Image (spheres, rainbow, N blue to C red):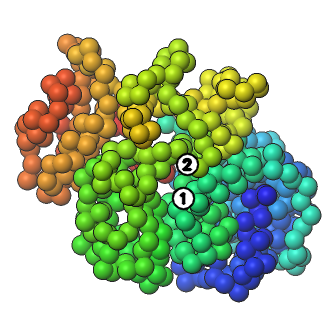
Amino acid sequence: MLVQHFLEHSARRLPDKTALVFGNERLTYGALNALANRFAHALMEAGLLRGERVAVFLDNSIETVISIFGTLKAGGVFSVLSPTMKERKLSYILNHLDASFLVTHASKMNQAAPASADAASLRAVITSGGGGVSPHTPVSILDWDGFIRGKPDHEPSCPSIDIDLATIIYTSGTTADPKGIMMTHLNMTHVSSSIISYLQNDEADVIMDVLPLSFDYGLYQALMSLRIGGTLVLERSFSFPYAIVERMAGERVTGFPGVPTVFAMLLRLESFNGRILPHLRYITNTGAPLPVRHIQLLRERFPNVALYSMYGLTECKRVSYLPPSEIDRRPESVGIPIPNTEVFIVDEHGNRVEQGMVGELVVRGAHVMKGYWKDPEETAKRLRPGLLPDEKVLFTGDLFRMDEDGFLYFIARKDDLIKTRGERVSPREVENAIHEIPGVVEAAVIAVPDEILGSAIKAFVVVESPAGLTERDVIAHCAKTLETFMVPKYVEFVSDLPRTSSGKVDKKALR
């Protein structure tokens, strides 16, 4: 199976069913598939060859979904880029990707035009939205409507097979130049099958997606929804939480994926509860572990909704999930391996550790990435020899422990672990303690230089009432619940925390 078959098979089975809701627009499976076919034929007529890359620089939109599936139908490789990306980074990625086409919106041409001018491989920029096109770029500018107008709406002949690349997903690049993660059709069909099986998705599901499609978690909501024949309710962003909750109620949403930031904001709304969302069947979280206090609050507000705490990384999409039946008993766990996946934990020498010991998590499965695009050195660091001859397994760079029942517990990113007073501290453990304080909305913990300790712990805290909590209160609470070396030396109250484009807390910005 190829990724574009997700849409094609559902369109043949359910041509008149609503596939995609965006704003006031609603597209059936038949209509969405026909538009993707037209885009594919247009790309092929414009010269796109098998395996060539199409960069998609758009906000969440109908055009984004069409671009993804149209590129695959034409035998190409899509790469959805963060819609907030600035010119310099866009220019780097277009060149690194050797992109043949760029799809964007007229409102983004201030960034896209100069970046396109520097991209030697680029043949054309396809713009939706009309107007606003810079006349100074040497690359051909093609209007979206004109580009697909009159093109056939039947399925194009696609030469791809499942070991071919389907997408290149770029990391946020917070510590260095962004890396392009290569995922094949096989990688993506395998992992989507696994996730669909444990979420028990079917065509009755209506999935709300507020996450950017440039973020793999947001992307897979679209892919899986269209695969099962469900309905995807796509939002441009999460800028208006009240409106999102109202939309969920109106569309009878059954599945809601989010990240800790999203749930922290929603839990401040009294209207976010099971009474206003009676059709909600499940909630999922990944990107970063949910604070235990937020898990408790979600369980109180949605006692009849399955809450899935999960862990994954873009290099293999998803690794583990906590069965909802275990959420009250093991709220700090991110669960067990997803179906048809094997994991183990190793020490710094690559030897497996005993249960309960901390080490680096290693992942084995058909969803492990092909590698980093044009970066064999970084690929060799992450993909190392596995159990079978010529097999490669993924070293995640994340520290975990496993209990006697095989449940996984995230400790920290190896790079985020704080060394202070001769001890190693997991930021998450300190953050969980701070989240227990009444009035705390969010907390983020980092290391800061210290002349005596080498590194000291600093906590950034967002509270509901700025005058209701003091630095001394936070430190005193941590002193009661944590070991001495884990207590923050500094506490700073902030109105909000900086985010990456995928909604995660940007700890580099905090530093």
- Image coords of residue 452 (percent x, y): 20, 13
- In the image: residue 308, left or right of residue 380: left
Q: Amino acid at mark 2?
A: Ile
Q: Quadrant of the C terminus?
A: top left
- Image coords of residue 497 (percent x, y): 32, 47
| Residue at 29% from the left image edge and 26% from the top image edge | 425
Q: Quadrant of residue 249?
A: bottom left
- Image coords of residue 292 (percent x, y): 28, 49
Residue placed furthest toward the front: 405
- Image coords of residue 388 (percent x, y): 72, 27
| Residue at 55% from the left image edge and 48% from the top image edge | 338
Q: Which residue is mark 2?
A: 338
- In the image: residue 258, left or right of residue 18: left
Q: Which residue is mark 1?
A: 198
Tag shown at residue 179: none
Q: Secondary structure at mark 2?
A: loop
Seen in the picture, residue 426 relative to 131 is either above or below; the reply is above
